[in-house]
Every structure is written in structure tokens, then in C-alpha cells.
Image: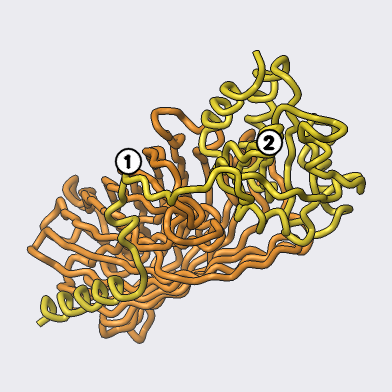
Amino acid sequence: MFFPFHRLRKWQQVKATIIVATLFTPATPLLAASCCGGGSGGSLILPKMSSAMFDMSASQENYNGFWQADGTILQDPPGSDLKQLRLNVGAAYRLAPNWQTSFVLPYVWNRNQYSGYEHNSNGLGDSSFSLLYEAFDDITCVWKVRELSDLKPAIYWGATLTVPTGISPYDDVPNKLDTTGLGFYRLDGSLHVEKTIYPLTASLTLNHGIHIKRPVNRERGEHVKPYNKQLGDRTSVTTSFSYTHFMDSLDAITAGFSYNYLTEGKTVTDGTEDSASGFRKQSISTSLTWAESGNRWITRVSWNHSINREGWGENFPITDIYTLGVSYLYE
Amino acid sequence: MNRNFYLLFLLSALLLLSACVDMKNDLLPSASDQRSAVTVGTIGHRPEQLVADFTLPNSTGKDFTLSTHLQTGTEPADAIVLYFTMWCPICLGHSDHMFNTVMPQFQDRGDVVYILVDYVSGSTAVVRATETASGYTGSGFVTLADNDQSLLKQFEATNGTTVVIAGDGTVLLNEDYRTGENLMNILDEHLPL
């Protein structure tokens, strides 16, 4: 296999970190079924050598049945066509050499035809604001392992606050299918570890989020006797692998594969656990990222696929998510 | 320069957010009781109101009329429980909870009619098929086919809405299922010992 080691330059290391950082942005645990809210925007990772980044992505999530509470699959009724479209706009900014901040604002369109019932709606989704600490000073990507220190990975510690800017079931909406957000603040802590030994990269992302308890005094547009509600804690693990190919034009193409495990605990209402709540989901993703030679533009496509087998999820829709995104970087 | 761009972008986004929708209810959720007063005994869908009579086909095509099951009807019940379902996982979780927990708890406490209202299938035949596929045939629930969503509109319901009607036609409860605890409390208060 030909690989142009002799042509490697500092900028190529930069490019590689760019690809890695944009490709392995921690997978946002998606809870996008419109009857459940969803539409969260996720978070961004700014490459080490960049000072700022603007990002825009469009995704479509298609529903193909759901896992019941016992893990068995129930297909959607004939004639059903459930989908959610999302447009995410975000930006990241470097506050200090090892600190960065970012935000993502999503806009959501629900397109639901369930048996003979059709419902379409759109609105802002839940926004997210992140603070990330890079526990490394220099780029850790290496071409060859010569000493033990070459094995040092890039480690990111982060916190993300999801803000309920979407339309929730507790807003003035008559139908849960009209919702584009969950209605809860959530604080996530995350750890992202990645290592690149060209042309291969591996990463691991751990995420744990706590929903903040809130009072509710309205359901489906009508005021109700107030009560307190708290969604369960959310935990996800994502592991990914990728291969980067540098072209003669100095552009780079990276193909990636990842696996995601996501779970959420049970909802508590006025101190009582909702036995029908909580979920578990496993999914895989493939992605292709293209970074142009000027290190400015990154374009990516990805496909996230829920593993459509019994026992691979509980109490959650089975979906496919297609995403097309573009980022613009400042050095 | 980048910082200015970032801040400008962030501020623009926040301005857009604040201008687009009324998010106050979620950003600053209120615990105040803002329910408007209800005139007891008027016709309506809210607690303390009297429910208007309705007739819908059940999953076998036979008509179900509410007034038949009120105190003055030919098959009087102590309470009628309506649950609006689209057979989604959350809906099935709730109806399973009713079947496994609520119904056994009150089986010796008078006559209660438990009803699943299917407002999404669109035809009685599909309602029947979905009821069977979901394992609810012969479960003790009556499944009604709200093919034109008239009952959904009457109760201003959505998926997961739970309504309890007393034998005299008074609405006792009309809210999301949540945990089922409110449903059990209402039945416990209302049903004979």
C-alpha cells in the first residue's frame, strides 16, 4: 500500500485533527420521535489548531417500527410514514489554548403519517451549549510509534447544557406529535478519548446526562394541577474507528464506523416512577468526510442505523438517520 | 475577529430564539395552578363537568354508547375509563400497566368499563387487526374505533390521555397517564368498597 509519508507536513497533522474532530463529534443521543420530543442539536469539537468553526448540517430520521419494553419489535401499521427532518446550525470558539466553547441550534420538521392519521409540524428544537477542556497540549496524531509517549491519546473533558428551546408537551400545543423538544434542561458530562496512528483512528466517547426536575402545569395545551417531573438519567457510549486517505491534491477523505449504546432511566413524577418510561438503544454509524486542502471546508455524510433485531433496544423507535454536514474552520 | 464573529453569531441565534416562539413555559417552568374555574354540571370534557353522550363502534363493529353504561342506562357501571392510544410504545406501556396493575386492584370494587380509544387506525377492521397484533383481544378492554376522531376532539385528547367518567356522567379525571397513580387514586376514592 502506497502512503506518502515522505510528504507529511505539519499542516497534514492539522488536517488529520480537523477530520478526526469533526468526524467524531460525540454522537448526540437521539430521542427524536416527535411524540417524545427530540431534535436536540448535539455538540461540536473544535480541532486543536483552529480558533473557531461554523457548522451546518441537515439530517433526516426515518422510523421503521419500535422496540417494545421487552425488546421485541412491533412494526408500524401499514401506511405509516414517520420522519423528522433537522437543520442544525452551530459554532465553536477557542477560549484558550486548551478550552473551547460551542453551541448548536436545531430547527425541526415533523412529518408523521401513522396509519390513517397525518400530522405535520415544525419549530425550533432544544439547543445545546458546551464547554470542553482538552487534556493535551500538542496534537497527538503520529505516523509511527517510536516511543511510549507516541501512544498518548487526545483526551477531551466536556460539559453540555441542553436548553429546552423546542416546543415541548408542556407548551401550548394540543398534540404531542407537534413537539420538537423535551421541555427539560439536561446537564451532560462527557469524556472523549481518541488516538490516531496514521492512517487509522480509534475513539471512545462516554456521556452521562442528568435531566433537571421541573414543575409542569400544562399538558396538551390545557392547564393542569401542577406536579413535578424528572426524566431519567441518560448514558451513552460510542466507540469509533476510521481510515484516512490523503490524495495527491492534498485533500483528505476519511471513512469511519462507529457503534453507539444509549440508555435512559425511568421518569419520576411526584416521586413515583413511571413504569412505562426509560429506554435502551444500540446503533451503528458509517460516515465519509472530505477535507479540502486549504483546511477550511469539511464536508461529511453519515448514516446512523438502529440494529433492527429483537433485544437490541427497549421502549424506543427503530430509526435510520441520514446526515449531510459542512463546517468552516478558522485557523 | 473570530471571537467577534462567534459572539455575533451567538447573539443572533439567541435573538432568533427569543423572537420565534414562546419558550418561557419551558425555560422558566411555573408551578402555579393556572386552571380556569369550571362550572360544575355543565357539559364539557374537564373534571367536574358532565360528559356529552357518544356512540362509537367497538373493534367487532358493535356500537358502544356511553349512556348505556351510565347509572340510567341498561348496563350501568360505577366508572368508565377511557385511554386514548395510537399503540405506540408509550401507549402500550400505559395500557399494559392498566391491565397488569390497575384492573386487578379494582376488580372487586364495583363495575368499571376500561376502554382503549384507537383514533389512528381509521377503520374498524384495522382497529381490530391492531388490537389483535398488540395482544389486547379478549383482554378485558373494550377497544373503540374513533375513526373520525370525534371522541379525540370531544375530550381534547392526544395519545396517552386518560379520562375517568363516573356513573352519573361526571368527568373525574382528564389528563396524561403519567404513572397511573392518579387514575388509581381517583378510582379508589370513587368506587364502592
Between residue A156 and residue A290, name the one nearer to us: A156
Q: Mark 2 to mark 1: distance in Å? A: 29 Å
| Residue named by callout 2 | B81
Please name the residue shown 40% across and 56% down the image.
A27
Please name the residue shown 14% across and 53% down the image.
A136
Disc on res. A213 = 1
Q: What color does chain B have in the rendering? A: yellow
Is A74 situated left or right of A133 in this image?
right
Please name the residue shown 83% across and 38% down the image.
B68
Dot 2: chain letter: B
Between residue B71 and residue B193, name the one nearer to us: B71
Please provide percent x and percent y for residue A307.
60, 49
Is A93 situated left or right of A114 in this image?
left
Is B132 situated left or right of A283 in this image?
right
Q: Are circles 2 and 1 on residues that touch, CB within 8 Å?
A: no
Q: Amino acid at mark 2?
A: Val
Between residue A235 and residue A139, name the one nearer to us: A235
Can residue A2 be seen by looking at this rendering?
A: no
Q: What color does chain A have in the rendering? A: orange
Please provide percent x and percent y for residue B181.
52, 28
Please name the residue shown 27% across and 70% down the image.
A18
When the figure is inspected, residue B95 is found, relative to residue A99, above or below; the finding is above
Quadrant of the image containing the C terminus of chain B: top right
When the figure is inspected, residue A128 is found, relative to residue B32, above or below; the finding is below
When the figure is inspected, residue A328 is found, relative to residue B99, above or below; the finding is below
Q: Amino acid at mark 1?
A: Lys
Disc on res. A188 = none
Quadrant of the image containing the N terminus of chain B: bottom left
